[in-house]
Image (cartoon, rainbow, N blue to C red):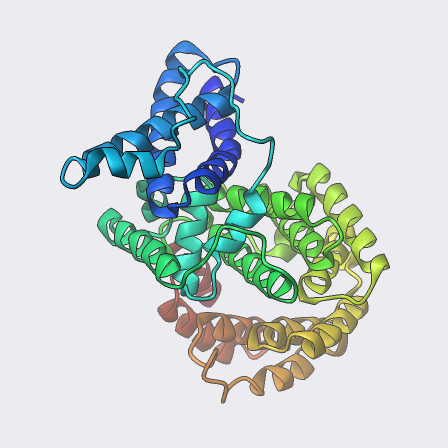
Amino acid sequence: MSPHARVEELLRGLAPQVLGVLVRRYRNFDACEDAVQEALLEAAVQWRAHGVPESPRGWLITVASRRLADRVRSDAARRRREDTVAAMVPAHETVAPPAGEDRAPDQDDTLTLLLLCCHPALSPASQIALTLRAVGGLTTAEIARAFMVPEATMAQRISRAKQQIKAAGARFEMPADPERTERLRAVLHVLYLIFNEGYTASSGPVLQRAELTGEAIRLARAVHERAPDDGEAAGLLALMLLTDARRAARTAPDGGLVPLAEQDRRRWNADSIREGIGLITEALARGPAGAYQLQAAIAAVHAEAARAEDTDWPQIVGLYRLLERVAPNPMVTLNHAVAVAMVDGPRAGLDLLATLDADDRIAKHHRLEAVRAHLLELAGDHAAARASYRMAARRTTSLPEQRYLEARATR
């Protein structure tokens, strides 16, 4: 890893810890988050040029506190400066030089921050943006690039999210059960969405965005470390690791999509597979399986097959049946249809797939037509398969997927 990459990794790990200290001390989430972002940017420049300080966490807290105090003083100049500053920064607290030690309690507020960023008052899009900014430490420009929207649009989304949290009266504290459990489910869902967008970009010229999958895995690992007894947190991390393990084999040299059955499994990441299988094996042994655990179990079955033809498809069909009972949704049925086709033949898979034609959630999604085309091709109905491949190609906004589907149609 290059020195610049090490600095970036360190900053992203420290970002939620520093923000947690400031919010706990000063309460104003919006102002604290902006101050932390300024400190991160300053650190990115100074640390790369002069090296990482002895106490990087203390350095960031000190600089962020200064930025926050500067902002308060600037605002107070238009009102009652001394009273505002006195109320914001307690008189007994002084700002130490950047090289000084952090006097804040040794407390990691990453999970508390994640729960706050995934507050139910926010839309999923706002939860994702705020999570990546406040907990992930990404700049607004980086998040905007990842989701292919203008930076101004993403800035407005993040600003609006912080205003909504304030209006909802959200407090920076760990919620009590059952609200904590419900909010944790929202956090896992947001991380799942971030990972999926990174693994298969919904639009644009590239198939996958490693910066998003990497960030989702890092944050999922942080959640699992802070909630080690939560089976679904372990299941989600396992699912991400087992899925991301295929990344290197998933694209051809020209950036084109390589489907699972045609991937060179020697290029799969053995360390990620080993960790993912260990996580899901332990999680399943502890109690009833949730949706993420079942998806991870399916991914583990694929990972354990040395060749595509060695895949234990009957076991996968059984797992999908369980998943449809636990978390029924059209994407589960779509994947279940593929597994059924591998066990009972393509016509059986097509019959199951036909049940989705009247489901508005997926009826016009390109993946429905892509799977239908694949099963029609397996059934030998090449004319119908070609038509479905071309319809799927018209519906997707991902250029690599579009090229892949057109190539299948031509073949």
State the residue lying farthest toward the right.
285
The front one of 250 and 21 is 21
Residue 32, percent from left and from top: 37, 40
Residue that appears at 39% across and 21% down: 95
- Across and down, in percent, residue 153 comes to 25, 54
Q: Is residue 245 visible?
A: no
Image height check: is 241 above or below 315? above
Image coordinates for residue 282, horizontal then vertical, percent: 82, 52
Q: Is residue 380 left or right of residue 55?
A: right
Out of 376 and 237, give the one closest to the viewer. Answer: 237
Q: Is residue 303 left or right of residue 139?
A: right
Q: Position of residue 57 (x, y in %)?
A: 50, 25
Q: Is residue 274 above or below residue 385?
A: above
Q: Where on the picture, by quarter, is residue 177? A: bottom right
Residue at the image position 63 percent from the left and 70 percent from the top: 335
Out of 32 and 403, give the one closest to the viewer.
32
Q: Is residue 33 above or below residue 189?
A: above
* 67 vs 299, nearest the viewer: 67
Identify the image quadrant of residue 133: top left
Q: Residue at x 49, y 50 (%)?
A: 172
